[in-house]
Amino acid sequence: MTDVWDALRGGLVTRALALAAEHGVAHALADGPRSVDELAARRGADADVLYRVLRALASDGIFAEVEPRVFANTDASSTLTADGWDAFARLFGGPWLQAVAALDASGEAPFPRVFGDEFWSWLGSHPEERALFDRAMEQNWQRRIERIDAVGLRGDELVVDVGGGNGSLLRALLDRHPGMRGIVFDLPETVRDEPSFGERLTFVEGSFFDGVPRGDVHVLSTIIHDWDDEAALRILRTVRASAGERLLLIESIIQPGNEPSGAKWLDLLMLVISAGRERTEEDWRSLLEESGWEPVAFHEAGAIEARPCP
């Protein structure tokens, strides 16, 4: 009974986290405990509503009520102060949650039905949400770097980050490899700080459906899972046309069995947003081979390595 209740209230938890992120609660508590009245006054929120939201989250270990109506961060809530997690919370508890509520078994992504446009076009016309999305993609960048490092780059390659957003991943990679050069390739509306790129990193605008810059290594970090198989094949074929030595996909790989799996829940989110999907190793092999790539390795860290077919 408890497990079912915990699952049923998941939408409430998501929205409560988003409210806390929207009102900057975790950041406000970074220097120590504060009263809910002070937190509410900072952002013009209703103190009673904010108290009830934080009290509920604290019952799950997200924030802690250390004195009556006084809250402090916990390890869990402190996550909202780092690496784009607050932006992720706002997306999950905002537009994505609205789309999730419209999920049915029709096979169509509900996001376009709810918002009147497919997700990527909608982002292009909503700069605030586009900036949130790019910041959200910075979360866990350290883990993504570790996945790339597991492949074993030489350190002198020209790396093209396809759909690289604001360049945070590639900047971190270049910091580790002084002899490496990089190209961030993404749509023109991407929010970026080009002066911080330095001499070894450039930004090229464009769509990965039309063509991508040439390079030694092409990295696609959580890009293909955004798309159905037809679109995924188009992207992989476009990259194949400009291929250098190899392709690195930073993606989840769905495992068989009933063990707890974040990838299987992420698969549902992709269905909701864009009719995309997470994939099994067999699915990935099929996509790569059909688009002109030879799978080389499926690294446990979560990197898929391929090279152009002869």
Image: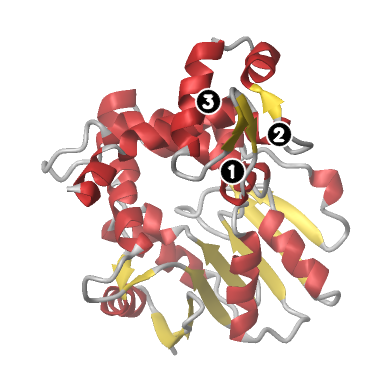
Q: Does 16 sit left or right of 261 as displayed?
A: right
Amino acid found under the numbered disc labelled 1: Ser
* Residue appearing at x 76%, y 81% in the figure: 155
**Mark seen at residue 128:** none
**Mark seen at residue 29:** 2
Q: Which residue is mark 3?
A: 126
Instruction: Depth check: give the residue in front, 291 or 220.
Output: 220
* Residue appearing at x 62%, y 20% in the figure: 36
Amino acid found under the numbered disc labelled 3: His
State whether residue 55 is above or below residue 210: above
Q: Mark 1 or mark 3: which is in front? A: 1
Q: Quadrant of the C terminus?
A: bottom left
Amino acid found under the numbered disc labelled 2: Leu
Secondary structure type for disc 1: helix
Q: Does 11 sit left or right of 221 as displayed?
A: left
First in residue order: circle 1 vs circle 3 = 1
Evaluate if marks 3 and 2 touch, with contact meaning CB atoms under 8 Å apart: no
Q: Mark 3 or mark 2: which is in front? A: 2
Q: Which residue is mark 1?
A: 77
